[in-house]
Amino acid sequence: MKKNNRKKKQKHRSKSEGDGIIRTRLPQEGEVLGQVIQLLGGRLLLTKCTDGNVRQVHIPGKHRRRMWTRLGDIILTMPRYGLQPDTKGDLVYRYRQNEVKVLQSKNLIPEEFTAY
């Protein structure tokens, strides 16, 4: 007789489940919210920012493999000060869907960005 040594599989729960409290990183001084409109390849994204500029955003090395971005994602960018601050920037944070809803409730995202 064979013994069944299989362990029961545990159900995976998403991180958003739980007590319902969502901590969302809000834009600080000098940071701008934006929506990814095109993936340029490599470490570059084209984003439409809330200040009206379209920026070419660079993903820094410490975020490159941890923050996977897709078309339509809402991200937090830091404009590059010095040369071309209106056309270039760096990625700081990528918001998840439940965090985007919190930003919408606080009216930090314009209506045209809501087609997430």
Image: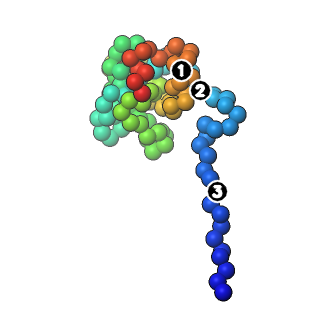
**Number of labelled discs?**
3
| 15 on left or right of 32 | right
Residue at the spot 45% in from the left edge and 27% down from the top edge? 75
Instruction: Say above or below: 75 vs 1.
Output: above
**Looking at the figure, which quarter contains the C terminus?**
top left
Q: Is mark 1 in CB contact (under 8 Å) with mark 2? A: yes
Instruction: Say above or below: 80 vs 45.
Output: above
10 Å crowding of disc 2: few (<14), some (14-19), many (20+): some
Q: Looking at the rendered structure, which numbered label has been put on residue 103?
A: 1
Residue under label 2, please give it.
24
Residue under label 3, please give it.
10
Residue placed farthest to the front in the image? 1
Disc 3 versus disc 1: distance between alpha carbons? 33 Å
* Quarter location, residue 110: top left
Residue at the spot 62% in from the left edge and 60% down from the top edge? 9
Identify the element where label 1 is drawn: helix
Residue placed farthest to the right in the image? 19
18 or 31: which is nearer to us?
A: 18
Using the rendered image of the protein, determine whether residue 29 is visible from the camera's viewpoint: no
- Residue 102: x and y, percent? 56, 22
Residue placed farthest to the bottom in the image? 1
**Looking at the figure, which quarter contains the N terminus?**
bottom right
